[in-house]
Image (cartoon, helix red, strand yellow):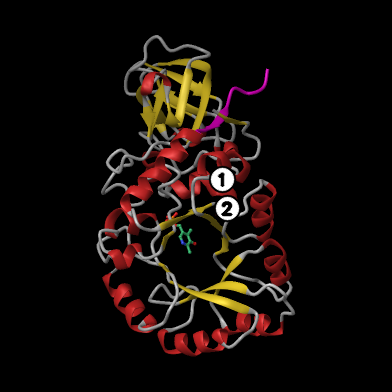
Amino acid sequence: MPRPIQATIHPDALRANLERMRRAAPDAKVWAIVKANAYGHGIERVYEGLRGADGFALLDLAEAERVRALGWRGPILLLEGAFEARDLELCSRLNLWHAVHCEEQIDWLAAHKTHQPHRVFLKLNSGMNRLGFTPAAFRTAWVRLDALPQVDEISLMTHFSDSDAARGVAHQMRVFAEATKDLPGERTLSNSAAVLRHAQDANVRADWVRPGIAVYGSAPDFPEHAAAHWQLQPTMTLSSKLIGVQQLQAGDTVGYGSTFTADAPLRIGVVACGYADGYPRHCSTGTPILVEGVKTRLVGRVSMDMLTVDLAPVPNARIGSEVTLWGNGPKGTVQPIDEVARAGGTVAYELMCALAARVPVLVA
Ligand SMILES: *Cc1c(COP(=O)(O)O)cnc(C)c1O
């Protein structure tokens, strides 16, 4: 028998979360962001649930090829554009729309011998200071692109740094409005947090929204809000089983480094899941976890292939009992991935993306 660990992808939840994003930005078209192999879910596994999107956005050219291979004929956007000049050949061949964030990418386009003019998304650095033209250079870049026969349509994009938190989007909205004033073309600005928190403003919604993490059922502004608050459903479940049980006495310790000491007799369970499966090693005693759908806590350190849980709330638990690390548990229970991520000092994005290749994945 293989190890009992299992990941499950939920297409119905992907569909419902995508619909949720549409309700938050009703007049906008929606890019489903499927970069990083669909946030670790697998592009092929999410395709059915997300094909109701208006387009797919990602950044790896091989992933764009996989989306086309699935039969998708609609828009695909390369969020970081070409990485070198010859990437434009694939853009021409597969009809990929692509971001243009630097002068070099314009040079490559100008030298590109294409028969099919390209649609590009000119990216403004409105304050994130990662990719994009500065406000001062933006118009010159637009004029350069507009003069190229290789380009037939220019859209305008930027990305928010603080849409999930107190600083918000107003400062970047001001920069975007000023830099793009009187320029024609569709606009796209909003990631998940902007869609959920700021999309009452039509200028924030704009023509296209770009939700990623919310489509995958995580609250972008956790812990201020939980996924349930935003009516988002888990799209990935990580489950396993108990493969061992130990009866501890007061003073006994658990696992490497003896970081947990029982202060009274305690039954603990050993779960077939460790950091080599993608469960964060930084999660320590107290991290929430479901056994038979009952909320309990991790105790001691996470090791490579196993972790240990407090069985006090689940006296009937035994070898073979169902364990939910994150996602959907038995009988309608849920272990939010955001809570696990927080306990590990990270975000749900990282947990999803880090699901290890050795974990078998089922599409339910
Ligand atoms: C990843 C990404 C998004 C989606 O962000 P979420 O926080 O997952 O919604 C949107 N736009 C760009 C440019 C991105 O790189």
Residue drawn at point x = 31 percent, y = 68 percent: 203
Q: Is residue 206 above or below residue 177?
A: above
Q: Mark 1: which amino acid?
A: Gly
The quarter of the image holding the N terminus is: top right
Q: Nearer the viewer, residue 10 or 73?
A: 73
Q: Is residue 272 above or below residue 165?
A: above
Residue 190 image point, x, y percent? 38, 62
Q: Nearer the viewer, residue 206 or 33?
A: 206
Q: Is residue 252 visible?
A: no
333 sits to left or right of 216:
left
Please give the residue where the numbered disc 2 appears in the rendered image. Answer: 36
Residue drawn at point x = 56 percent, y = 80 percent: 102
- Mark 2 neighbour class, 10 Å CA radius: few under 14, some 14 to 19, many 20 or more: some
Task: Tell me the number on the disc at residue 88.
Answer: none
User: Residue 56: which quarter of the image?
Assistant: bottom right
Q: Nearer the viewer, residue 56 or 131?
A: 56
Q: Nearer the viewer, residue 7 or 18?
A: 18
Q: Are marks 1 and 2 in contact (CB under 8 Å)?
A: yes
Please give the residue where the numbered disc 1 appears in the rendered image. Answer: 40
Q: Is residue 151 above or below residue 219?
A: below
Residue drawn at point x = 71 percent, y = 76 percent: 85
Q: Bounds of the magenta span?
A: 1-10
